[in-house]
Image: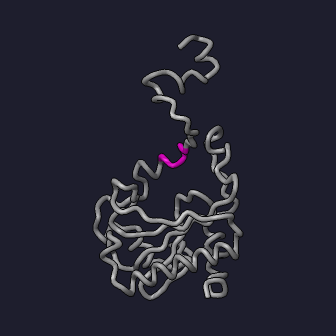
Amino acid sequence: MTADDAASGGALEDAAGLAGDRDGFERLWTPHRMVYIGGQDKPADDTAAACPFERVQGLPDAEGLVVHRGETAFVVMNLYPYSPGHVMVCPNRHVSSYVDLTPAETVEVAQATQAAVRVLTSVSAPHGFNIGMNQGAVAGAGIAAHLHQHVVPRWGGDSNFLPIIAQTKAVPELLSDTRQRLADAWDAASA
């Protein structure tokens, strides 16, 4: 790498051993998520007593950012959202594997996921959704001990330049305000 390359910043991508080989993919770097990745707000162990999803079930809805409570599952705002309105559907029971859900839990998690899509569509008019769950820490589950399904509303261009060059994520409203709007719309839009 020459001094001119270093000054331009472009050579870092091409320098062997620094950023790997070029593969034709663009990268979206999200350094703001390092706090989460580093373990802030993650439980120290896999017990129900340490689980944040167990903890929020004992809090008032507004304080725990709970959008909806059902008989066997609930919907809660994500503290580290990928986009505005990012919610998670969780069984009430502290269970880590999808195959360990009871039939009633499976149905309610699926129905709450559908309802979350309807509510988010009604309230925020996203262009699409990412919906899914990660099973186990090695698969990307941040809280592996308590099953949760992500419902992430997406808009064209929602991953813009701000996180990349300004270490800033544009979330247009407070999580508590989003939670209130979704909770207010839940009964009407989820039917």
Q: Looking at this view, is 173 or 10 the one in front?
A: 10
**Residue drawn at the location 43% of the way across and 79% of the way down:** 58
Q: Position of residue 45 (x, y in %)?
A: 29, 61
- Is 181 positioned to the left or the right of 12 in the image? right
**Residue drawn at the location 44% of the way across and 81% of the way down:** 73
Image quarter for residue 119?
bottom right
Over which residues does the magenta segment extend? 30-34
**Residue drawn at the location 53% of the way across and 14% of the way down:** 1
Q: Where is residue 75 in the image (x, y as percent from the top left)?
A: 51, 76
- Is 119 positioned to the left or the right of 88 in the image? right
Judge whether 158 appears above or below 89 on screen.
above
**Screen quadrant of the C terminus:** bottom right
Q: Looking at this view, is 17 or 75 the one in front?
A: 17
Judge whether 27 appears above or below 127 on screen.
above
Q: Position of residue 32 (x, y in %)?
A: 54, 46
Q: Where is residue 133 in the image (x, y as percent from the top left)?
A: 43, 65
Q: Looking at this view, is 177 or 25 the one in front?
A: 25
How many numbered marks have been drawn onto this rendered protein structure? 0
Image quarter for residue 9?
top right
The answer to if 32 sits in the magenta stretch is: yes
* Secondary structure, magenta segment, majority class: helix
Q: Looking at this view, is 6 or 66 the one in front?
A: 6
The answer to if 43 sits in the magenta stretch is: no
**Residue drawn at the location 55% of the way across and 78% of the way down:** 114
Give the color scheme: rainbow, by chain, secondary structure or one colour.
one colour
